[in-house]
Image: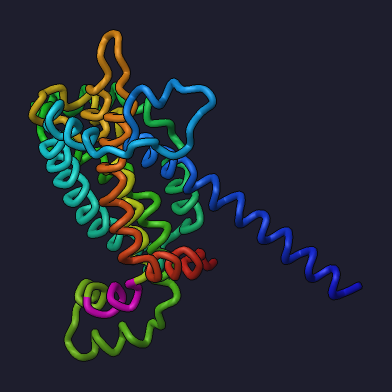
């Protein structure tokens, strides 16, 4: 009976894992297959899962119909700068919460969590008015600054758990050797919390790379459009070229897939070990 129970529990776990995998990978696989089809195949009945005559012409048109490389450059610049700045600020904030004897520490953490729950659409008008007042519309800065603010809660929460797991004796030894508290943070605590730093960085990068609403509202200039906004321009008034749009989406997904695959072990370690301690 016990063996049957174990097999049943294992089977349920396998089924749950299979559902998660299918839910995560099937849309990407379907987009990939669509990007290799000609438009006529999309209206065939019954539906064909695999392309009859795979073609790369959709990828060629994705780069020629719109300046896709320009959109990628804009997205990459904004995402990288926002990620680096988010990590710098959130590391200092997380260290203060984890190490300093702050009053109402749990209230501060609660406020950080609560601040990340506001729908972005409710913040759009204040952000737009602020950027217009600062004369920053249609610039990289108009996106970088809001992305830093939006990324700070999740990055800070991830890093707090890791910083709390680092023994204080290591920092004290560094400060005895002449390091300042800030030097101990960057030379001791941050390197020892590498999985958490990579996890927070990838979360921040993905959020900035995928963000659409602010990118659409703050940068109306054609030369400043990011990838999510640029992909919407393939749609015409009376046409919706799904194969070309799918090719552009695959181009947008590839950098994220490479990034996550490159740091997979560190990200998994960061997600599993970064729980907050009281």
What is the count of numbered marks? Answer: 0
Q: Which residue is drawn at 16% across and 30% down?
A: 225
- Picture coordinates of residue 2 (x, y %)? 87, 74
101 relative to 83, above or below? below
Which quarter of the picture shows residue 126? top left
Q: Is residue 189 found left or right of 226 in the rendered image?
A: right
- Pick the front one: 199 or 76: 76
- Picture coordinates of residue 266 (x, y %)? 38, 70
Report the quarter where the N terminus lies: bottom right
Report whether residue 141 is seen.
no
Q: Residue furthest top?
A: 238
Q: Residue at x 48, y 56 (%)?
A: 104
Identify the main secondary structure in magenta: helix
Q: Residue at x 54, y 26 (%)?
A: 46
Which quarter of the picture shows residue 145? top left
Report whether residue 131 is seen.
yes
Question: Does the segment drawn in magenta span residue 88?
Answer: no
Q: Give the range drawn in magenta.
A: 187-194
- Pick the front one: 179 or 231: 231
248 relative to 177, above or below? above
Q: Which residue is drawn at 65% across and 54% down?
A: 16
- Picture coordinates of residue 9 (x, y %)? 76, 64
- Picture coordinates of residue 231 (x, y %)? 25, 29
């Amino acid at each position: 009976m016990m063996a049957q129970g174990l097999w049943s529990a294992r089977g349920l776990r396998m089924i749950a894992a299979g559902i998660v995998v299918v839910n995560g990978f099937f849309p990407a696989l379907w987009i990939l297959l669509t990007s290799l089809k000609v438009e006529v195949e999309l209206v065939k009945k019954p539906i064909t899962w695999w392309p009859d005559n795979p073609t790369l012409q959709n990828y060629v048109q994705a780069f020629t119909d719109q300046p896709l490389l320009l959109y990628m450059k804009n997205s990459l610049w904004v995402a990288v700068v926002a990620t680096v700045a988010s990590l710098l600020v959130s590391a200092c904030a997380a260290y203060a919460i984890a190490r300093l004897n702050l009053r109402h520490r749990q209230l501060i953490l609660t406020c950080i969590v609560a601040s990340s729950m506001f729908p972005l659409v409710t913040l759009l008008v204040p952000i737009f008015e602020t950027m217009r007042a600062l004369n920053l519309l249609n610039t990289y800065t108009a996106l970088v600054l809001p992305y830093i603010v939006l990324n700070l809660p999740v990055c800070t929460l991830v890093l707090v758990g890791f910083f709390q797991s680092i023994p204080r004796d290591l920092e004290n030894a560094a400060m005895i050797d002449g390091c300042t508290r800030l030097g101990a943070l960057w030379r001791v605590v941050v390197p020892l919390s590498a999985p958490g730093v990579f996890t927070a960085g990838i979360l921040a990068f993905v959020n900035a790379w995928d963000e659409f609403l602010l990118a659409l509202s703050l940068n109306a200039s054609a030369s400043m459009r990011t990838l999510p906004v640029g992909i919407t321009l393939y749609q015409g008034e009376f046409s919706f070229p799904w194969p070309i749009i799918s090719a552009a989406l695959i181009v947008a997904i590839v950098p994220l897939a490479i990034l996550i695959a490159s740091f997979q072990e560190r990200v998994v370690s960061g997600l599993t070990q970064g729980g907050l301690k009281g």
